[in-house]
Amino acid sequence: MPHPGTRFYVIGCYDSRITFYSQQVRALLLIHALHDQGYLATNPRIAVIGAGAAGVTAAAAAALVTTGEVFLFERAPNIMPLQALTLRRHLDPHIFDWPESDTDDPVADLPILDWEKGPSRQVHDDVEAEFEAVAQRLGARLQRRMRQEVKSVTPQGNMFSLSIERDREQGDPADPPGSRVLYPDAFDMVLLAIGFGREPEQSVPGIPNRSYWEDAGVPGGAIAGAAHPRFLISGNGDGALIDLVAAGSADFSHAEMIRVINSHPGIAQLFLPLRSLDVQARAAEAAGARFDYIAAYDAQILPLANQIGLIAAVRQRLKPGVQLVLQTLHAEAFAATSSALNRLAAWLVMRACDTDAQANFRHLACPDLIPIAPPDPAPYLAQHWFDCGGEAIGANEVIVRRGPVREAVRAPFDNMLAGFDAEHRAWLAKHGDAVRVPKLSSAARKLFTDAAIRLGVPMSQREARQLANLLPARVQVRTNNGALRWSGTAAPAEITSPWADAGSLEIACPDAPADLGPTSAALIRAAAHSRRITLIADPASWNREAQRLTALSLQAEGMPMPRIENRQTGGNTRDPLPLPAAQLASRLNQAMDRWMLDAIHRHIEAYCATGQDFGWRIGIEAHDDLRHAMAAVWQGWHASFIADPALLARFLQLMVCALDADDSLDSASVLVGPITLDALIRGTAVACMIASDWQATTPHGVRPGNLKRQRAAGDWCGHSCGASRIDGKPLALCAADFMWQTEFVILSLQGSLKVASEAEEAFSTLDPSQPPLTDTAGSGQLIMTIDDALRDAAKAGPAALHALLEAAETGHFAARRHAILPIDAENAA
């Protein structure tokens, strides 16, 4: 956020939500805004003060999108000094937003300086390595000034003069000896990224503070010889709440704490009341009041937590006999500025202690902890004793988490920050939740991604670790306020990319198929037709539905199951697109239908133009004149399909399914894909071939059938079908007695249907007296198949095909008259 009227900008120093990830996003949003509004067009000389998460990200981003010089100042020897010290503290990019959607995504998914959740030191090393890669590519345009502290910033016209303290170097004056050197420098723009500052060395007399960011600062295991180890935690921010959980845990792991709560069966039942309480708390605190979270949790969360066994699960993880005291300034132990997950975890430890006969928890509110001598006699053994509001409290270990001293770190810049605090509060009040959680825009992501690619910045450490998997595109589909939300690195229209072997795709589906409505079938369709698409979902809820639509489908032969894997994935939450389930399913299916149409078009167009039939997919050698006539028909059909996606969908579905009913067509759409492409090409080509003689035959968009032939004696509906099965039976064995719903049927099995039927007769359980296809007395339809007669006619040309079809039609009507004459005679009698 800029200081009004200047080119002095402040990143996150006054916000209440300071996480590693949120600071990076704020930095990227600021640099994008400066670039978008032209402030970087003059290639300014930029000073970035502070090399924490915000500072290193802002410096790298600014250097990538301008040809000016960027100087990063940090008083420590290395960038991001706090996060380099610990393996026991855990950084997670999105968990602060829990229980909102996608907080379990382990990947920050940033365009530069990206990382995934893990120990603080690992995250530090990954981000540092990528920053070094950017700096190496940019050379002198991105300079680090380590162990240099900016002591003041003074406006001078359109510039800023900085007074900077550095170590003494060879050639500097000798007096005074051992001191550091002050030197001035001038900049066009200053970005202040000093964060909240550091924790004081001592907040309670006699108790040295151990930094939150040091392994030694994490509360330890059982205290030797103590049947009831006693811990006193002072503070109510996120650090204090995490350390309360750590002190109460037999074997604390930050990542394990998150997993135990987030993956507990039934945890989703708590989400709605937790969200509602957070809204109430923020409203109360915005009005200057305080909110009693513990009372609210006890009233609304406790019954549900007991019901799903969550408190019992936490009790099993308690340190044996642990005695916990949480001291806060106010009577309300929790604040809305802390993470919902940390609040819940701390509250669960409190209530777990209530159910354990050996454990105990107390919350005390008092202005401060005053060290005192042990009472005589002491009610219990403790190393430290304090007066807390008139009560003597003892503890074996004291953890003070009262936050950093903000004023000290801001003091050098008071002249620049005058009035900024009030202006920032007004800005927060105006925009509310819209700015509480910073979100990276698509435009900002594209700006920095393109810049990194253009300048040849190497891939991130996270990307390098995933190189073996060729970095599949990742998307997620999940429920969202009564609708669905698609998000990730691919748009719905790109779901067919793996069908063309253009990369791979992982689709995370955290919800059950029933929750996604018709979209679940569309996702199964996409994955069933390509091994390059994987559904990341719970097999227990997805396998049954996937089997029903593929491997166990009665309308398909040899349809494989899609790949369904139960594992964690990430990087799939960008660019969210909320849509109703039916609308998202329609978009996905239309994209897949259009891919099929393009594939069919390429083959038929080449066949009609040159006679090429790669793979012998059509399997009919046609005369040049016939192929030219087919081309004219196909041109009209192709245009109709492009103009009407519903017409195309129905045509393709009935081509792979003999049944013509809404429920069967929904499942038939799953069968339309690369696996059935040969049958669809053949069926479409044969239908076009017949339509070239029946000039007024076009695709039909309503029941019955998928074709319509205009005749002087009345229109006919037709069904062009290349299905392999009807209700689980081979088409060759049951086509003749199947009750087709149209006046004519085009069956495009490769080879004569009669020959196919006879070849399988030994395996048939059908009545051997079944009428042959030439006998239309059973169904009454004109049934046409690919046989030797059709092949010969196609090779001879349009006249021969016309003669064959006319003879078939004449024979059809003769057979129908023969079938109904006895009935007429009976009626006449």
Image: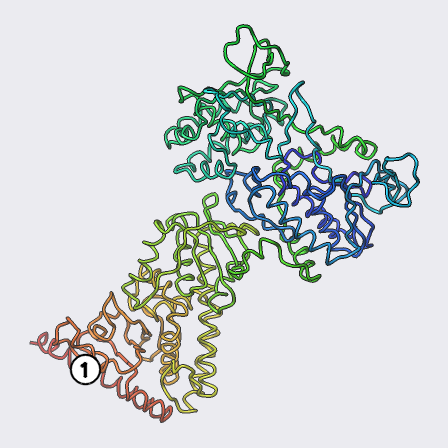
Residue 736 appearing in the image: yes
Residue 61 appears at what percent x and percent y?
71, 51
Residue at the image position 52 percent from the left and 42 percent from the top: 103
Q: Is residue 827 above or below residue 411?
A: below
Way the structure is coloured: rainbow
Residue 208 lies left or right of residue 294; in this view the side is right
Residue 496 lies left or right of residue 199; in this view the side is left
In the picture, which quadrant includes the N terminus?
Answer: top right
Residue 407 appears at what percent x and percent y?
75, 28
Q: Residue furthest left?
A: 829
Residue 147 appears at what percent x and percent y?
78, 41
Residue at the image position 49 percent from the left and 21 percent from the top: 229
Nearer to me, 24 or 691: 24
Residue at the image position 48 percent from the left and 70 percent from the top: 642
Residue 816 appearing in the image: no
Nearer to me, 381 or 820: 381
Disc 1 residue type (three-letter):
Ala
Q: Residue furthest front?
A: 225
Regarding mark 1 in the picture, which secondary structure is present there? helix
Residue 670 appears at what percent x and percent y?
37, 63
| Residue topped by disc 1 | 815
Q: Based on the displayed image, in which of its 4 quarters is residue 619 positioned?
A: bottom left
Badge 1 density bin: few <14, some 14–19, many ≥20, Cα 10 Å:
some
In the picture, which quadrant includes the C terminus?
Answer: bottom left
Q: Based on the displayed image, in which of its 4 quarters is residue 755 positioned?
A: bottom left
Residue 719 lies left or right of residue 129; in this view the side is left
Q: Is residue 507 above or below residue 217?
A: below
